[in-house]
Image (tube, rainbow, N blue to C red):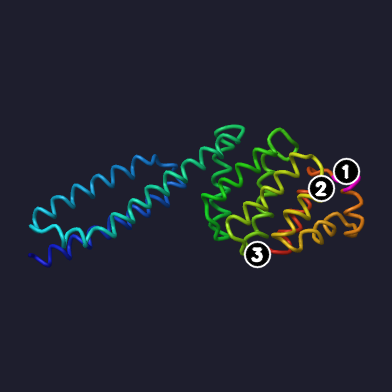
Amino acid sequence: INQQKIKDLTASIKQKQDALKEVDKQMGFNQRNVGNYSSAMAFLVGGVRGAIGSFGTWGIAIIAVGEALTSLNGLILQGEALRRTQIGVENVSSSSLEAGINLDFLRGVASRLGLEIESWNRDFKLFAGATEGTALEGAKTRQIFEGISVSLAAMQLTADDASGAMRAFSQMIAKNTLQSEELKGQLAERLPSAIRLTAEALGITTEKLFEQMKAGKILAIDVLPLLAEKFKDVYSDD
């Protein structure tokens, strides 16, 4: 058995794996079709089969490439999942231009705050769907989402808790008014300072906040921009 050939093959597979990771990264910028990943996998498998013939043994070749193939397959699945969430963002955007702006925005926020882009795309889709047709649609949606994202990242919430917090904001918009159920029952469980910061953003006491919420006097479209800005001021490192 030619050990140098095995070494060369392993190095070659590592190079292809690194290249595929770069493609996965660039897909976020170029929206590449996931078929590119399938083509890359087919190319690698073909190379492996040829190498097996040269080595004359299955065991060593399988050991050499098994980990790389598993990694590549994982990248393919990630690419497919990411593309599905991108389609969701496109569906809640008013135009192809707006979709591009939204996707660029999400990539920038996720990269800057160290967030997982796939789940963040999903959360944005839900939130943007709630603001669609309201005074918060478009640029204001992105501004609010960024302010909220800063606070969630600073608190180092799990993806599930972060999604739960975003659902609370989406429900506020759907109900049109700020209510205790979302603020106290959902958001404050994940962001303990949410009630205090909401009151501060409105320039009132927490007691007054609950009085006005009970009376249905606080409109979501009025308070969310203020709250998001407050969150950003408090939690941002800038």
Amino acid marked by disc 2: Gln
Compared to residue 228, the image places residue 42 above or below, namely above
Determine crowd level at label 1: few under 14, some 14-19, many 20+ residues with C-alpha closer than 10 A. Answer: few
As drawn, is 224 to the left or to the right of 66? right
What residue is at 7 percent from the left and 57 percent from the top?
Answer: 56
Q: Is residue 215 magenta?
A: yes
Q: Compute the Cα span from label 3 to label 2.
A: 23 Å
Q: Name the quadrant containing residue 126.
A: top right
Q: Compute the Cα span from label 1 to label 2.
A: 7 Å
Q: Nearer the viewer, residue 63 or 36?
A: 63
As drawn, is 137 to the left or to the right of 79? right
Task: Write down the residue under mark 1.
Answer: 216
**Residue extent of the magenta highlight:** 214-218
Compared to residue 56, the image places residue 172 above or below, namely above
Determine crowd level at label 3: few under 14, some 14-19, many 20+ residues with C-alpha closer than 10 A. Answer: some
Element under disc 3:
loop
Amino acid marked by disc 1: Gly
Q: Position of residue 42 (x, y in %)?
A: 25, 44
Q: Compute the Cα span from label 1 to label 3.
A: 29 Å
- Compare marks 3 and 2 and give the one earlier in the sequence: 3
Q: Is residue 105 magenta?
A: no
Instruction: Give the number of the disc on residue 179.
Output: 2
Q: Name the quadrant containing residue 1.
A: bottom left
Q: Are marks 1 and 3 in contact (CB under 8 Å)?
A: no
Element under disc 1:
loop
Magenta span: predominant SS is loop
Instruction: Give the number of the disc on residue 155.
Output: 3
Q: Nearer the viewer, residue 168 or 218?
A: 168
Amino acid marked by disc 3: Met
Q: Position of residue 132 (x, y in %)?
A: 68, 35
What residue is at 65 percent from the left and 46 percent from the top?
Answer: 142
What residue is at 37 percent from the left and 52 percent from the top?
Answer: 74
